[in-house]
């Protein structure tokens, strides 16, 4: 229905027709249509939080259990104030709750990518995810066991620095290779020499994942080569892989790491 000034965005929800339609408008309209207590959730929440691997798509919302469900509508028995917040003006599940919700509907690999990007951005912590899993909103949810296993097998320390690194860690794990340390710091005395994407410190082996935007510019390129030379002089062995290596030639890249570890 359109009257020249307003047009219907959802049943009972209208938008100004002259304004350019956006995905954020569509999400907010869906939340308003769902009624009091509704929040953007699941894959929509992941897109709002800009988690790795989650693009804008049809709006998904969560509503109280007494409310009617439907396509893209998830129902919850209880959503505490610790599980909901506002981002870009839209009521949404918190990053920790979003990761928990995702565990019940997408693959473990995608959940891990979401978790690592949330940790990288400082949006949540492993401890917070554990606490929400043990809270009212986490107990009894689908995917809870798989998420617990993912958290248990995760190496302590910094998150991966990119989706590329997450994908490579997953590939090494799936191949039965040891889990590398992430963002490993190398010191010479008290001076930080390098922060390595992935590393096996006991073998003095490190892996650098070079995306298209990495090491851009002459100054960064030169500094990166000097850093690598310094590490080699300290006894470290470098392995470097590109986005194409990971997305198109992954088995070969994993075999290189396997051979280096066995050497």
Image (cartoon, grey):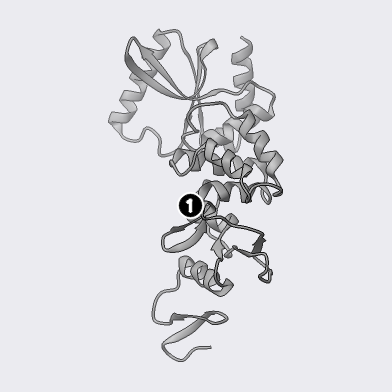
Residue 83, image x and y in percent? 54, 52
| 23 versus 118 height, above or below | below
Q: Nearer the viewer, residue 128 or 180?
A: 128
The residue that appears at 57% across and 51% down in the rendered structure is: 98
Report whether 238 appears left or right of 251: left
Residue 66, image x and y in percent? 67, 68
Res 57 quadrant in image: bottom right
Quarter of the image that includes the C terminus: top right
Residue lying at the far bottom in this picture: please name it: 3
| 134 versus 44 height, above or below | above
Residue lying at the far left in this picture: please name it: 219
Residue 212, image x and y in percent? 44, 39
The crowd level at tag 1 (other Cα within 10 Å; few <14, some 14-19, many 20+) is: many
| 227 versus 47 height, above or below | above
Report whether 105 appears left or right of 53: right
The residue that appears at 58% across and 65% down in the rendered structure is: 58
Res 37 quadrant in image: bottom right
Q: Nearer the viewer, residue 226 or 74?
A: 74
Instruction: Give the SS element for disc 1.
Output: loop
The residue that appears at 64% across and 11% down in the rendered structure is: 262
Residue 177, image x and y in percent? 65, 22
The residue that appears at 56% across and 55% down in the rendered structure is: 80
Query: Number of numbered discs present?
Result: 1
Label 1 sits on residue: 49
Report whether 178 appears left or right of 125: right
| 247 versus 190 height, above or below | below
């Amino acid at each position: 229905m359109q009257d020249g000034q307003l047009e219907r965005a959802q049943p009972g929800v209208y938008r100004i027709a002259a304004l350019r339609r956006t995905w954020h408008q569509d999400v907010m309209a869906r939340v308003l249509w769902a009624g009091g207590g509704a929040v953007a959730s699941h894959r929509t929440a992941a897109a709002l939080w800009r988690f790795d691997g989650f693009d804008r798509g049809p709006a998904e919302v969560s509503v109280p259990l007494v409310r009617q469900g439907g396509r893209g509508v998830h129902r919850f028995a209880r959503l505490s104030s610790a599980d909901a917040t506002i981002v870009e003006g839209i009521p949404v599940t918190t990053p920790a709750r979003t990761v928990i919700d995702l565990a019940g509907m997408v693959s473990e690999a995608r959940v891990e990518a979401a978790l690592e990007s949330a940790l990288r951005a400082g949006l949540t912590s492993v401890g917070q995810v554990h606490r929400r899993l043990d809270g009212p909103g986490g107990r009894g949810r689908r995917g809870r066991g798989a998420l617990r296993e993912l958290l248990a097998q995760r190496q302590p320390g910094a998150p991966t620095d990119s989706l590329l690194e997450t994908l490579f860690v997953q590939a090494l794990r799936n191949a039965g290779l040891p889990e590398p340390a992430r963002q490993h710091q190398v010191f010479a005395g008290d001076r930080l020499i390098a922060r390595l994407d992935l590393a096996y410190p006991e073998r003095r082996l490190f892996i650098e994942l070079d995306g298209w935007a990495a090491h851009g510019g002459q100054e960064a390129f030169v500094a990166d080569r000097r850093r690598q030379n310094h590490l080699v002089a300290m006894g470290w062995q470098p392995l470097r892989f590109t986005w194409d290596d990971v997305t198109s030639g992954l088995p070969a890249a994993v075999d290189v790491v396997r051979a280096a570890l066995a050497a």
